[in-house]
Image (tube, coloured by chain):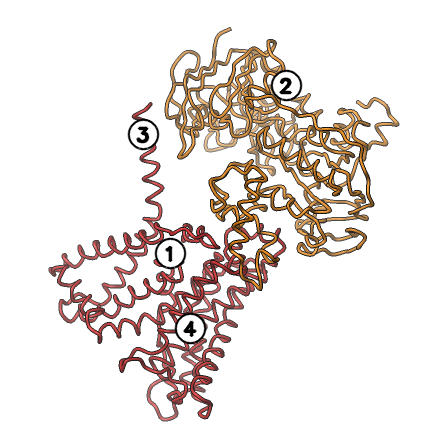
Chain colours: A red, B orange
Amino acid sequence: MGEDNKKSLGFASRINWSGIVTPLIGIALGLSVGAIFIWSQGVNPLHAYYYLLEGSLLSWASLSGTLVKTVPLALTGLAVLYSYKSEIFNIGAEGQVYMGAIGATIIGINFPNVPAPLHILMVLVFAGILGGAFAFIPGYLKAYKGINEIVVTMLMNYIALYFLSMIVQGPLKEPDSFFPRSVPLVDTAVLPKLFGSHLHIGIVFAVVLAIFLSWFFRRTTTGFKMIAAGHNPNALHYAGVNVKMLLTKVMVVSGFIAGAAGAVEIMGVHGRLIENFSIGLGYDAIAVALLANLSPLGVLLSALFFGALKTGANSMQISTGIPVSFVYMVQAMVILFVVASKEMPRIIAIYNKRRRVKKNG
Amino acid sequence: MGIVLELEKITKIFPKVIANKDVDLKLEQGEVHALLGENGAGKSTLMNCLYGLYRQDGGKIYVRGEEVTINNSDDAIKLGIGMVHQHFMLVPELTVAENIILGLKSAKEPLLNLAAAEKKIKALSDKYNFGINPKDKVRTLPVGIQQRVEILKVLYREADILILDEATAVLTPQEVDELFKVVKKLTKEGKSVLIITHKLEEVMALSNQVTVLRDGEVAGNVRTVDTNPTELANMMVGREVLFEFEEKEMDLKEVYIETKNLKVVDKKGVTRVNDLSMKIHGGEILGIAGVDGNGQNELAEAITGMIPFQEGSVVIKGVEKTKLDVRDVYEQGVSHIPQDRHHTGLVLPMSIKENLVLTDHYLEPYSNKGVFNKDVVDEHGAEMIEQYYIKAPDAGVPTRELSGGNQQKIILARELCREPDILVAVQPSRGLDIGATEFVRQKLIDQRDRGAAVLLVSTELEEILQVSDRIAVMYEGEFMGVVKNGEASISEIGLMMAGTRRSNIESQGEVE
């Protein structure tokens, strides 16, 4: 997966058309199959999709709502992408997001006298450190002990989830509140809102990080080593690189990004730590990274797509009665079609060859 | 005598390449027919079509005069065609008999009928003088005998057309002789044998008829008595082959690399290199001969820091160390052509230019403070493509898309352009065609002439003899002897490869 894209990375400068076309085909096919489902419910698919679109992109109110959902998807998607460049499948972004959120809250509800930019930076860094530390465990086990990172990260997600529950019902619980939640962050730790909407400055973080990573994987020796390690760790060992150390660091940085994503969500949207604040974000992020074909800039677009689906789903439900969970079906189908259509060029090539041979032979 | 097997105009096309085009081949009963060609000439593809692993895109196969369709190996076996693969398909923990009946229905299904099988195998073994005990565990048998088990497997299935795929690749010279006897015995008994090989000597020694493949097409078909090695080589490559390298008086410098009582134990606890001491001077090539798997690779990997060694030390340009780090070694001026370019030497999906800086990527001018100088890397790529005659449209092409020879040239370019003081080359021409092989060997000699110390590990004795100044023969982790090239006969080297110390050869005179 992401094969084509990774191939042309490093410092190759060709435009990767299949990396752009494949996701579009996947989206089209996913929506088409979704249309059949909508139609079976006695609703005109075009109507349903119109409301989906209207509720997600066609007005500033809906668009800003979509963008708010896009931010965590993009940031977490970039976290997943980062490690996947080295063929490490970080299913643990989910847990790292929670750990980051806990870290964000600890710093965010204290230090009222620090200037806002510094306070936000402190929150991001500490959240990142907690996320990174949490990711260090599967990273180390993978690199040095050969233990499958998918299993470890997936199981650790539960640890993080229940740890967060424990924290918000215990030490960080708002004293007199009925809800399992923390006290609000102090003002200096709340992300500034943009254009008078709910959209916060986290969108800028996501865009900057995507641009930076895009450059990073094309031009830096570390990005080069990471991609090479993903394809052939033996060759990298042969080239004198400490591959185990590298892979561990990759996982830590991936966890750092996911942790910071959790902090952005806390600082930008919720303003405090609440239980189950981002259930499934880490898993959605995998879909985001895959749809983006592992291109950092593509992550922005695919996060926008999934953000739009999530946001528009409500208005679709209200107007047509198609349940919100429908969009999760579409989301899954899109990914399946993207994965499948990656094979299409190859299959077509083989088919054409065969035909040619028959004609000539 | 009739024709037992005929291939008529076999064509097989893969995406991007035509592997076989209109290939004709006729195998006479009771004869040995050699299918000769370089690696990549299409021999394996042809045999896989015959054995049902591939379906040909055009052409017909006749067995005993009848046209047949072979969809899988079962079909082939039913037609009496048996293949002995280059890599044995045996289960080491099972006995000979168990291996042979594996996958066959027993007469007493669902129970095994091992006793009957053992009896039949014994009878077959005696008939062909194989000297095999069906009750032996395969893992206890030497490679040459294991190969006979493979042949027995095929005979047991009543094949009368045998295909031997690169059968001598893993054998010592003595085992090769034994194999030849076996093959001759088989043909005497009326079996027909097709040998697939790229070795001229084998063709000359064994076959009655030769079909030469080049670039997927038949380049020639001759009776062996009517031809000679030079003619065959020319058919294989399509041009005159010059395999003579200029002899040069060695201009020895000081010792560049040395091992002292080196011992390497692998992860399974097997001692791979045992108490080994050697010295290589600048300006000489030490060739390490030996059958694959006798510790040569581990020796090369240990002195380049790829794997740890447990005892002893390595001295590189006067600095003695008991623990090595790959990058450290590299920065001492050691270049390494690893034994497996796909496994170790290259990152196949990455471009040529990226692979060209795989080891140097962190150094100026290629990068500066962790950021690549794109122009320098591009330029370097283009330059190397030109200097090393790498056939590729541009330096941005993924190395996966290149032929083996061109892939190897990328590694050579990368490792040699820095003018190393010490070069460790392991199987540098494995799987390459004659042209690329020649190129690689010339480069090794160039390095020596430039004054580098070269350690060459090769299982191709021909290669060792051609370029080495001194030859060490390795067997089970130890040197059986170190001789100046030309001082020992091929049969002496063969004996050393089979585990006889040179000192014993001399004292006993003629052994065996």
Q: Are marks 2 and 3 on the same chain?
A: no
Residue B182: mark: 2
Residue A97: mark: 4
Mark 2 vs mark 3: give the one in front.
3
Q: Secondary structure at mark 1?
A: loop
> Would you say the residues marked 1 and 2 are in contact, meaning their CB atoms lie under 8 Å apart?
no
Side (left or right) of B112 relative to A307: right
Disc 4/disc 3 C-alpha distance (Å):
53 Å
Disc 1/disc 2 C-alpha distance (Å):
56 Å
Horizontal and vertical percent position of residue A292: 36, 59
Q: Give the residue type that dot 3 points to.
A: Arg
Q: Is residue A321 above or below residue B63?
A: below
| Viewer-closest of B484 and B384 | B384
> Would you say the residues marked 1 and 3 are in contact, meaning their CB atoms lie under 8 Å apart?
no
Residue under label 1:
A293
Disc 2/disc 3 C-alpha distance (Å):
45 Å
| Viewer-closest of B162 and A231 | A231
Mark 2 vs mark 4: give the one in front.
4
Mark 4 vs mark 1: give the one in front.
1
Q: Could you tell which of marks 1 and 3 lies nearer the N-terminus?
A: 1
Q: Give the residue type that dot 2 points to.
A: Val
Horizontal and vertical percent position of residue B291: 69, 34
Classed neighbour count for the residue bearing mark 4: other residues with Cα under 10 Å, few (<14), some (14–19), many (≥20): many
Residue drawn at x 28%, y 80% is: A195
Q: Secondary structure at mark 3?
A: helix
Residue under label 3:
A356
Residue drawn at x 32%, y 39% is: A348
